[in-house]
Amino acid sequence: MNNISIQNDERGLLPFPIIIAANTGEAEALRIVVKHYDSYIASLSMRKLRDEQDNTYWGID
């Protein structure tokens, strides 16, 4: 990327130039966006599941 700062601001937001670069398909910007939202994506993929003995556990959906 062209010397774009990848530091999040104090509110945890991605810099606007990173968002624009990712929107145009810039590979490094896309990597930064995915890394930024990685834990959020992982939490959305989890759900409560039940096994045959009616035990509840968290698993990947």
Image: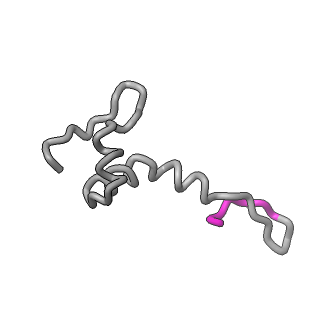
Image spot of residue 25 (x, y percent): 32, 60
Classify residue 44 as left or right of residue 11: right
* Residue drawn at (27%, 61%) of the image: 27
In the depicted structure, whether residue 33 falls above or below residue 50: above
Secondary structure mostly seen in the magenta stretch = strand
Image spot of residue 60 (x, y percent): 62, 65
Classify residue 33 as left or right of residue 53: left
Classify residue 32 as left or right of residue 2: right
* Residue drawn at (13%, 42%) of the image: 3
**Residue 1 or residue 60, whichever sits in front:** 1
- Residue 60 in the magenta stretch? The answer is yes
- The quarter holding residue 49 reads bottom right
Q: How is the image coloured?
A: one colour
For the C terminus, the quadrant is bottom right
* Residue drawn at (65%, 63%) of the image: 59
Farthest residue in the front direction?
24
**Residue 20 or residue 1, whichever sits in front:** 20
In the depicted structure, whether residue 50 falls above or below residue 6: below
Farthest residue in the top direction?
10
Q: What range of the chain is rendered magenta?
A: 55-61
